[in-house]
Image (cartoon, helix red, strand yellow):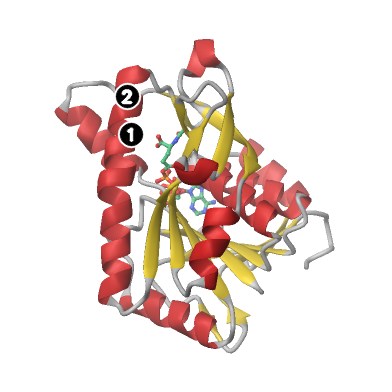
Protein backbone atom coordinates (compact mmCIF):
# COMPACT_ATOMS: atom_id res chain seq x y z
CA UNK A 1 0.00 0.00 0.00
CA UNK A 2 1.62 3.26 -1.18
CA UNK A 3 0.95 6.04 1.31
CA UNK A 4 1.68 9.71 0.74
CA UNK A 5 1.91 11.96 3.79
CA UNK A 6 0.74 15.49 3.07
CA UNK A 7 1.43 18.18 5.65
CA UNK A 8 -0.99 21.08 5.23
CA UNK A 9 0.48 24.21 6.77
CA UNK A 10 -1.60 26.73 8.69
CA UNK A 11 -0.47 29.38 6.21
CA UNK A 12 -2.52 27.80 3.42
CA UNK A 13 -5.46 26.13 5.17
CA UNK A 14 -7.79 29.00 4.34
CA UNK A 15 -6.51 29.27 0.78
CA UNK A 16 -6.58 25.65 -0.45
CA UNK A 17 -7.61 25.85 -4.07
CA UNK A 18 -10.06 23.57 -5.92
CA UNK A 19 -7.09 22.53 -8.06
CA UNK A 20 -5.37 21.24 -4.94
CA UNK A 21 -8.32 18.93 -4.27
CA UNK A 22 -8.38 17.86 -7.94
CA UNK A 23 -4.72 16.84 -7.64
CA UNK A 24 -5.55 14.94 -4.45
CA UNK A 25 -8.29 13.07 -6.31
CA UNK A 26 -5.89 12.31 -9.20
CA UNK A 27 -3.37 10.98 -6.70
CA UNK A 28 -5.95 8.63 -5.20
CA UNK A 29 -7.15 7.53 -8.64
CA UNK A 30 -3.56 6.52 -9.36
CA UNK A 31 -3.65 4.22 -6.31
CA UNK A 32 -1.99 6.34 -3.62
CA UNK A 33 -3.38 6.61 -0.08
CA UNK A 34 -3.01 10.12 1.35
CA UNK A 35 -2.48 10.70 5.07
CA UNK A 36 -2.82 14.33 6.10
CA UNK A 37 -1.06 16.06 9.00
CA UNK A 38 -2.06 19.66 9.51
CA UNK A 39 -0.60 22.75 11.14
CA UNK A 40 -2.42 25.84 12.35
CA UNK A 41 0.12 28.26 13.77
CA UNK A 42 -1.69 31.43 12.58
CA UNK A 43 -5.03 30.28 14.10
CA UNK A 44 -3.30 29.58 17.43
CA UNK A 45 -1.77 33.05 17.33
CA UNK A 46 -5.21 34.66 16.76
CA UNK A 47 -6.73 32.76 19.68
CA UNK A 48 -3.80 33.65 21.97
CA UNK A 49 -4.35 37.25 20.94
CA UNK A 50 -7.98 36.99 21.99
CA UNK A 51 -6.85 35.66 25.39
CA UNK A 52 -4.23 38.45 25.52
CA UNK A 53 -1.38 35.95 25.70
CA UNK A 54 1.77 36.90 23.79
CA UNK A 55 3.00 34.29 21.30
CA UNK A 56 6.61 33.31 21.99
CA UNK A 57 8.85 31.18 19.77
CA UNK A 58 12.31 29.70 20.24
CA UNK A 59 14.00 28.31 17.11
CA UNK A 60 10.65 28.16 15.33
CA UNK A 61 8.95 26.25 18.17
CA UNK A 62 6.17 27.78 20.23
CA UNK A 63 6.98 28.16 23.94
CA UNK A 64 3.94 26.38 25.40
CA UNK A 65 2.91 26.78 29.06
CA UNK A 66 -0.03 24.80 30.49
CA UNK A 67 -2.56 27.48 29.57
CA UNK A 68 -1.16 27.87 26.05
CA UNK A 69 -1.26 24.08 25.60
CA UNK A 70 -5.00 24.12 26.34
CA UNK A 71 -5.47 26.81 23.71
CA UNK A 72 -3.26 24.95 21.21
CA UNK A 73 -5.38 21.81 21.59
CA UNK A 74 -8.64 23.74 21.48
CA UNK A 75 -7.63 25.46 18.25
CA UNK A 76 -5.82 22.66 16.42
CA UNK A 77 -8.16 19.84 17.37
CA UNK A 78 -11.43 21.71 17.85
CA UNK A 79 -11.13 24.22 15.06
CA UNK A 80 -8.43 23.57 12.47
CA UNK A 81 -8.90 19.81 12.20
CA UNK A 82 -12.68 20.26 11.97
CA UNK A 83 -12.28 22.97 9.32
CA UNK A 84 -9.95 20.87 7.14
CA UNK A 85 -12.11 17.75 7.51
CA UNK A 86 -15.11 19.87 6.52
CA UNK A 87 -13.35 21.20 3.41
CA UNK A 88 -12.34 17.70 2.35
CA UNK A 89 -15.84 16.30 2.95
CA UNK A 90 -17.36 19.10 0.87
CA UNK A 91 -15.07 17.96 -1.96
CA UNK A 92 -16.38 14.41 -1.62
CA UNK A 93 -13.49 12.81 0.31
CA UNK A 94 -14.08 10.37 3.17
CA UNK A 95 -12.06 11.61 6.13
CA UNK A 96 -11.37 10.71 9.73
CA UNK A 97 -10.01 13.41 12.04
CA UNK A 98 -7.52 12.11 14.57
CA UNK A 99 -6.01 14.03 17.48
CA UNK A 100 -2.39 12.80 17.55
CA UNK A 101 -2.81 11.70 21.16
CA UNK A 102 -5.76 9.42 20.28
CA UNK A 103 -4.86 5.75 20.40
CA UNK A 104 -1.36 6.89 21.52
CA UNK A 105 -0.70 7.64 17.88
CA UNK A 106 1.98 10.32 18.30
CA UNK A 107 4.09 9.32 21.31
CA UNK A 108 6.33 12.17 22.36
CA UNK A 109 8.95 13.34 24.81
CA UNK A 110 9.60 16.82 26.16
CA UNK A 111 12.27 18.66 24.17
CA UNK A 112 13.21 21.06 26.96
CA UNK A 113 10.54 21.23 29.66
CA UNK A 114 12.24 24.14 31.39
CA UNK A 115 12.76 26.29 28.30
CA UNK A 116 9.88 25.31 25.98
CA UNK A 117 7.25 23.83 28.31
CA UNK A 118 4.76 21.38 26.79
CA UNK A 119 6.56 20.94 23.48
CA UNK A 120 7.57 17.55 22.21
CA UNK A 121 9.52 15.48 19.79
CA UNK A 122 7.88 12.31 18.52
CA UNK A 123 9.76 9.20 19.66
CA UNK A 124 7.27 6.65 18.39
CA UNK A 125 4.26 6.58 16.10
CA UNK A 126 1.60 3.95 16.71
CA UNK A 127 0.22 3.50 13.20
CA UNK A 128 -2.73 1.26 14.22
CA UNK A 129 -5.35 4.00 14.10
CA UNK A 130 -3.96 5.46 10.87
CA UNK A 131 -3.96 2.05 9.14
CA UNK A 132 -7.46 1.32 10.43
CA UNK A 133 -8.70 4.54 8.83
CA UNK A 134 -6.92 3.89 5.51
CA UNK A 135 -8.07 0.28 5.31
CA UNK A 136 -11.66 1.43 5.91
CA UNK A 137 -11.41 3.90 3.02
CA UNK A 138 -10.87 7.10 5.01
CA UNK A 139 -8.16 9.74 4.72
CA UNK A 140 -6.72 10.22 8.22
CA UNK A 141 -6.40 13.92 9.12
CA UNK A 142 -3.98 14.15 12.03
CA UNK A 143 -3.57 17.00 14.52
CA UNK A 144 0.06 17.38 15.68
CA UNK A 145 -0.54 16.82 19.38
CA UNK A 146 1.53 14.16 21.08
CA UNK A 147 1.11 12.17 24.25
CA UNK A 148 3.99 11.98 26.74
CA UNK A 149 4.76 9.08 29.08
CA UNK A 150 3.40 11.12 32.02
CA UNK A 151 0.06 11.38 30.19
CA UNK A 152 0.45 15.09 29.33
CA UNK A 153 -0.37 16.36 25.85
CA UNK A 154 2.54 17.96 24.03
CA UNK A 155 2.54 20.53 21.25
CA UNK A 156 4.42 19.18 18.20
CA UNK A 157 5.52 21.24 15.24
CA UNK A 158 3.37 20.08 12.32
CA UNK A 159 6.31 19.69 9.93
CA UNK A 160 8.18 17.43 12.38
CA UNK A 161 4.99 15.44 13.03
CA UNK A 162 4.52 14.83 9.29
CA UNK A 163 8.13 13.63 8.89
CA UNK A 164 7.68 11.17 11.81
CA UNK A 165 4.40 9.85 10.41
CA UNK A 166 5.96 9.42 6.95
CA UNK A 167 8.86 7.53 8.46
CA UNK A 168 6.59 5.27 10.54
CA UNK A 169 4.35 4.48 7.56
CA UNK A 170 7.37 3.96 5.27
CA UNK A 171 5.51 6.39 3.03
CA UNK A 172 6.23 6.56 -0.66
CA UNK A 173 6.36 10.33 -0.41
CA UNK A 174 6.07 13.19 2.05
CA UNK A 175 4.82 16.53 0.72
CA UNK A 176 4.82 19.76 2.69
CA UNK A 177 1.92 21.83 1.40
CA UNK A 178 2.38 25.53 1.95
CA UNK A 179 1.45 28.96 0.60
CA UNK A 180 4.36 29.26 -1.86
CA UNK A 181 5.21 27.14 -4.93
CA UNK A 182 8.21 25.56 -3.20
CA UNK A 183 11.61 26.89 -2.24
CA UNK A 184 12.18 30.21 -3.94
CA UNK A 185 15.65 31.67 -4.35
CA UNK A 186 15.77 35.22 -5.69
CA UNK A 187 12.09 34.81 -6.52
CA UNK A 188 12.66 31.73 -8.71
CA UNK A 189 11.28 28.27 -7.92
CA UNK A 190 14.05 25.74 -7.31
CA UNK A 191 12.84 22.39 -8.63
CA UNK A 192 15.48 20.27 -6.86
CA UNK A 193 17.67 21.09 -3.87
CA UNK A 194 20.40 19.24 -1.97
CA UNK A 195 21.13 19.27 1.77
CA UNK A 196 24.31 21.31 1.17
CA UNK A 197 22.40 23.93 -0.81
CA UNK A 198 19.76 24.08 1.93
CA UNK A 199 22.47 24.64 4.54
CA UNK A 200 24.05 27.49 2.61
CA UNK A 201 20.70 29.12 1.77
CA UNK A 202 19.78 29.06 5.46
CA UNK A 203 23.09 30.64 6.42
CA UNK A 204 22.83 33.41 3.81
CA UNK A 205 19.22 34.12 4.81
CA UNK A 206 17.60 32.98 1.52
CA UNK A 207 15.69 30.33 3.49
CA UNK A 208 14.22 31.77 6.69
CA UNK A 209 11.30 31.70 9.15
CA UNK A 210 8.70 28.94 8.75
CA UNK A 211 10.61 27.46 5.80
CA UNK A 212 13.43 26.40 8.18
CA UNK A 213 11.45 23.75 10.18
CA UNK A 214 9.99 22.64 6.85
CA UNK A 215 13.35 21.98 5.16
CA UNK A 216 14.73 20.45 8.36
CA UNK A 217 11.72 18.11 8.56
CA UNK A 218 12.12 17.36 4.87
CA UNK A 219 15.75 16.38 5.45
CA UNK A 220 14.73 14.30 8.49
CA UNK A 221 12.21 12.46 6.33
CA UNK A 222 14.78 11.74 3.60
CA UNK A 223 17.33 10.61 6.22
CA UNK A 224 14.64 8.29 7.65
CA UNK A 225 14.31 6.62 4.27
CA UNK A 226 11.31 8.42 2.78
CA UNK A 227 12.42 8.44 -0.81
CA UNK A 228 10.57 11.39 -2.20
CA UNK A 229 10.14 14.55 -0.18
CA UNK A 230 8.75 17.76 -1.61
CA UNK A 231 7.58 21.23 -0.77
CA UNK A 232 4.48 22.08 -2.79
CA UNK A 233 1.78 24.72 -3.04
CA UNK A 234 -1.80 24.30 -1.81
CA UNK A 235 -2.92 27.04 -4.18
CA UNK A 236 -2.14 25.22 -7.43
CA UNK A 237 -2.39 21.75 -8.97
CA UNK A 238 0.50 19.76 -7.52
CA UNK A 239 0.09 16.37 -9.23
CA UNK A 240 -0.94 14.88 -12.57
CA UNK A 241 0.03 11.54 -14.18
CA UNK A 242 2.79 10.84 -11.66
CA UNK A 243 4.35 14.30 -12.14
CA UNK A 244 4.71 16.51 -9.09
CA UNK A 245 5.12 20.28 -9.07
CA UNK A 246 7.23 21.97 -6.40
CA UNK A 247 10.70 21.58 -4.88
CA UNK A 248 12.13 18.07 -4.49
CA UNK A 249 14.53 17.60 -1.59
CA UNK A 250 17.59 15.39 -1.90
CA UNK A 251 19.35 14.10 1.20
CA UNK A 252 22.71 13.81 -0.49
CA UNK A 253 24.24 16.13 -3.01
CA UNK A 254 23.64 14.87 -6.52
CA UNK A 255 21.43 12.01 -5.43
CA UNK A 256 17.88 12.99 -6.13
CA UNK A 257 15.46 10.22 -5.43
N1 LIG B 1 13.41 30.43 0.34
C1 LIG B 1 12.09 30.45 0.62
N2 LIG B 1 11.22 30.11 -0.34
C2 LIG B 1 9.89 30.16 -0.12
N3 LIG B 1 9.34 30.58 1.05
C3 LIG B 1 10.17 30.93 2.05
C4 LIG B 1 11.58 30.88 1.87
N4 LIG B 1 12.16 31.27 3.04
C5 LIG B 1 11.17 31.56 3.87
N5 LIG B 1 9.96 31.38 3.32
C6 LIG B 1 8.70 31.65 3.98
O1 LIG B 1 8.18 30.42 4.49
C7 LIG B 1 6.76 30.53 4.45
C8 LIG B 1 6.16 29.14 4.65
O2 LIG B 1 6.34 28.77 6.00
P1 LIG B 1 5.13 28.87 7.06
O3 LIG B 1 4.53 30.24 7.00
O4 LIG B 1 5.58 28.37 8.38
O5 LIG B 1 4.13 27.87 6.37
P2 LIG B 1 3.17 26.71 6.87
O6 LIG B 1 2.15 27.35 7.76
O7 LIG B 1 2.63 26.27 5.56
O8 LIG B 1 3.96 25.67 7.58
C9 LIG B 1 6.51 31.19 3.13
O9 LIG B 1 5.24 31.79 3.05
C10 LIG B 1 7.63 32.23 3.06
O10 LIG B 1 7.22 33.44 3.65
C1 LIG C 1 5.73 23.35 18.85
C2 LIG C 1 5.05 24.19 17.80
O1 LIG C 1 5.59 25.20 17.41
N1 LIG C 1 3.87 23.77 17.34
C3 LIG C 1 3.10 24.46 16.35
C4 LIG C 1 1.97 23.56 15.92
C5 LIG C 1 1.20 24.09 14.74
C6 LIG C 1 2.04 24.16 13.48
O2 LIG C 1 3.06 23.53 13.31
O3 LIG C 1 1.48 25.00 12.55
P1 LIG C 1 2.08 25.45 11.13
O4 LIG C 1 2.32 24.22 10.36
O5 LIG C 1 1.01 26.29 10.58
O6 LIG C 1 3.36 26.23 11.38
C7 LIG C 1 2.52 25.78 16.95
O7 LIG C 1 2.20 25.82 18.12
O8 LIG C 1 2.38 26.74 16.16
Label 1 vs label 2: CA separation? 6 Å
From the viewer's side, name the closer residue of 41 and 233.
Answer: 41
Mark 2 = which residue? Answer: 68
The residue at 24%/21% (across/down) is 53
Q: Give the position of the C terminus as an image quadrant.
A: bottom right
Quick check: 83 above or below 126? below
Q: Is mark 1 within 8 Å of ligand 2?
A: yes
Pointer 1 with pointer 2, Cβ within 8 A: yes
Q: Is residue 47 visible?
A: yes
- Quick one: which residue is furthest to the top in this view? 114
In the rendered image, residue 39, in percent from the top left (x then y), is placed at 41, 48
Mark 1 = which residue? Answer: 72
Q: Secondary structure at mark 1?
A: helix
Displayed-image quarter of ligand 2: top left
* Left or right for 197, reference 103: right
Q: Quadrant of residue 189?
A: bottom right
Q: Secondary structure at mark 2?
A: helix
Amino acid sequence: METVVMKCGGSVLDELDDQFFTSLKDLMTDGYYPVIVHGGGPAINSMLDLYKIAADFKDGLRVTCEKTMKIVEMVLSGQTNRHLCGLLMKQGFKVLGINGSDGSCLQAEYIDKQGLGYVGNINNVNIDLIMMAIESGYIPVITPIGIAEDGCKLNINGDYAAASVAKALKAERCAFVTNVDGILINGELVSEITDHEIESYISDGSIYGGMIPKVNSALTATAAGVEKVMIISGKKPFYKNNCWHGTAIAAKEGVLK
